[in-house]
Image: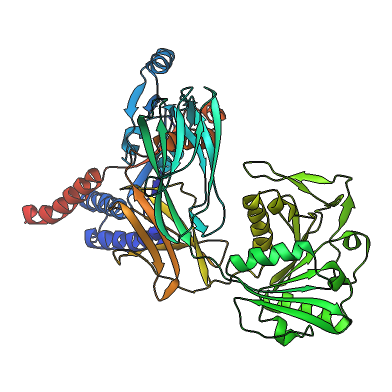
Amino acid sequence: MNNQLHFINEQWQWPALGIAFLLLLLFIWTAWKGSFNRGFFVNSTVGVLAVIALSFLFLRPTRAAEVSGSALLLTQGYTAEQFDSIKKQLNNVKVIKYNTGVDFSSSTDSIGQVTILGQGLRDFDFWQLEGIPTYYIKGDMPKGIVKLNYPKQHRMGDLLFINGVYHQPVLGNRLVLQSSSGEGLDSIVFDSDENFRFKFDSYPKTSGKYIYQLTEKDSAGKILDSSPLPLMVLKKQVLRIFISNQSPSFETKYLKNFLSEEGHELVVRSQITKGRFKFEYFNTPRSALYNFLEKDLKKFDLLILDTDTFLSLSKGSKQSITNVIRAYGTGVFVQPNEALFRTANGMVDFGFERDGKDEISTFNKTKVQLEKYPYAFEDKKANGIVSENYTYGLVLGKGRLSTTVLTNTYQLVLDGKSASYREVWSKIIEGATRPQEAAGVFETSDSFAFQDTPYSFTLRTVLVKPVVQQSDDYSIPLIKDLVLEDTWHGTTYPVQKGWQSLAVQGDTSLVMDYFVMDTIQWKSVIGANTILENSRVFNPSDTLAVNRKITSEVSRWGFFLTFFCAMAYLWLMPKLKA
C-alpha cells in the first residue's frame, strides 16, 4: 500500500515552517548553558519534537492510501435475481441501500468499486460517487408512462400537444386527458402491450393556472391511476399586423378573418387600381398607410405582403422595411406565388430548390395533407430558421423575414378542417412575428417539482447581481456561470405542495410559476429518466480500476500528546534539578 503525506492547510506551509524555525532557535537558545553537555542535547531534541508536533497540529497532515473492495448499491427497482447473481461473483461485498437524498458517502470510504443495481441514483445524488469506479447494471423499465412531453407554459388559443410513451399497457385500457374540472378532452385506447405511443391535443380557452390529469381507466371505466399535468395558460398575445395585397385573394380573405377572430389589431390594404387602395380595419382605429415609411412600419409587429407587393417595392421601401426588421424586430411574411420562387427580388435570397412535390403532411395528430408549391428550402444558411416543415425564415438583426411553400390553405376551411387551418397559420405567425423582448428568463431541465426534493433552475438576465426569491420571500443563493456572463444557477427545496413561484427581486416581469407535487406522482417517468441518466453517467469501462485512493486526516491526538509531554518535560526538569 502506497502512502503519501499531504496537508489540509498546505497554503500556510511556508509561513508555518518559518515560525517553526524561529521556535526551534528559541528552544536551542534556552537549552544552551555554555557547553555541549548531555542536558543540552536532550533538551534540544525534546524542543525539536515539540516544534514538529506543533507544526503538524496546525498544518493537519493527511494520508492518501489505496483501498480495494466492492459494494453493491441497491436502488429502486432492483431484482432479487440480480442481487444474488452479483453477490456470488464478488467476495466480501458490502451492501448499501440507497434512499433518495440521503447521504451514504461515509459507507464508501473504504470501497474501491461500486456496482449499482436497479433504476439508479437521482442526478442530485451523483456527487456521492465522485472518484469511485462505478458500474451500473440497469433495472427493468418501470410499467406506466415512461416518456412525457408537453409545454409547461402555453398560450391561450394555441393548440396544446401532449405526447409520450406508455410501457407495457393493458390491452383495452384507456388513457384519458382531463381538464382541471374533470372534463374529458381527449382519449385513446391501448391496442398494443409494448411501448405504446400516445398523443393528445386540446385548445385551452382561458388563461390561468390549471391542473390537467392523465387518467388511466380499464375497459369498464374504473379509474386505475391519475397523474397531474400542471399547466400555465398565458394570455393571448395581441399583435398589430399590416397586410398589403396588390389584388384581393381567397388566401388573404380567410387569413384576415382568422387573425381578426383571434383578436389581433389588423390593417388590410388592397390595391384597386394604380395609386388607389381599399383599407379595412379590424380591432383597431382607422389609420391609412399609403407608403412604406419607417416611422409608420415600426408600429407594427408583423407585415404580411403578397409576392406582387414584395417584388414591386421601390428602393426606398426596401430600405425602410429592412431598417424596421433589423432595428425594431418587426417581422415580415411574404405570401408566396410562383414568381417568388423564380424571381430575384434584390432584397433577400431565401434559397429555394425544386423538389417536384405538390403536397406535404403536417406533424400534427391527424397528419393533414397540405397543397404546396413544388419547392423546398435549402436550409443551408447560417441565419435560416425552419418552423415545422412548411415555413422558413431568415434572421435579420432583431427580426425575421419569412415565407412558406404552402398554397391554397383556405381550402382547409372549406373542407371543414378549421382546426388544422388554425394550427398551420398559428405556427406561421408565431415564427414570423416580432420576438418579445424580456429582461431575462427562467429555465429548468427538471420534468416536475416534488416536495422536499431539489428543484434546479437557470436564470438568464442582464442584471448584474440578481436576487431570486421564493413564494415565501426567502432568497435563493445563486451561482454565476463560469462561461456565460448573463447566466446564473440555483436550487430550491420546495416544502409546500401546490403552485409556487420564483421571482427576481425588483422586476415583476421575471417570474416562473411551478407546481410542487407529492413524490408518489409520476414515478414511472422519474424511474425511466433515472435509468437513462445513470446509463449515461456511469461508464462500465470505469470498473477496470478496482483500487482507488482515498485521503484521510492523520489523527491529531498523537501530535497533541507529543507536544504536551515535550512542553511538560521542558517545564518540569529545571524545577526538579533545582
Q: Which image quarter holds the C terminus?
A: bottom left
* Residue 169 x %, y %: 47, 25
Residue at left offset 53%, top offset 31%: 542
Q: Is residue 193 above or below residue 18?
A: above
Which residue is pictured at 51% across the width and 60% down the height? 156
| 466, above or below 108, in the image | below
- Quadrant where the N terminus is found in the figure: top left
Question: 263 and 560: which one is in front?
Answer: 263
Answer with left or right where residue 569 lies relative to residue 191: left
Q: Position of residue 124 (x, y in %)?
A: 41, 45
Extreme residue in the right direction: 343
* Residue shown at the point (45%, 37%) measured from the top left: 176
Can I make out residue 331 in this image? yes
Position of residue 74 measured from the top left corner of the image (x, y, whole percent): 37, 27
Counting from the top left corner in percent of width and height, residue 9 is at 37, 55
- Left or right of residue 295, residue 16 in this image: left
Observer able to see residue 132: no
Q: Quadrant of residue 268?
A: bottom right
449 w.r.t. 171: above or below: below
The image shows a total of numbered marks equal to 0
Q: Is residue 468 left or right of residue 199?
A: left
Name the residue rendered at 82%, 61% in the picture.
336
- 241 or 92, which lies in front? 241
Q: Which colouring convention does the figure follow?
A: rainbow
Residue 252 placement: quadrant: bottom right
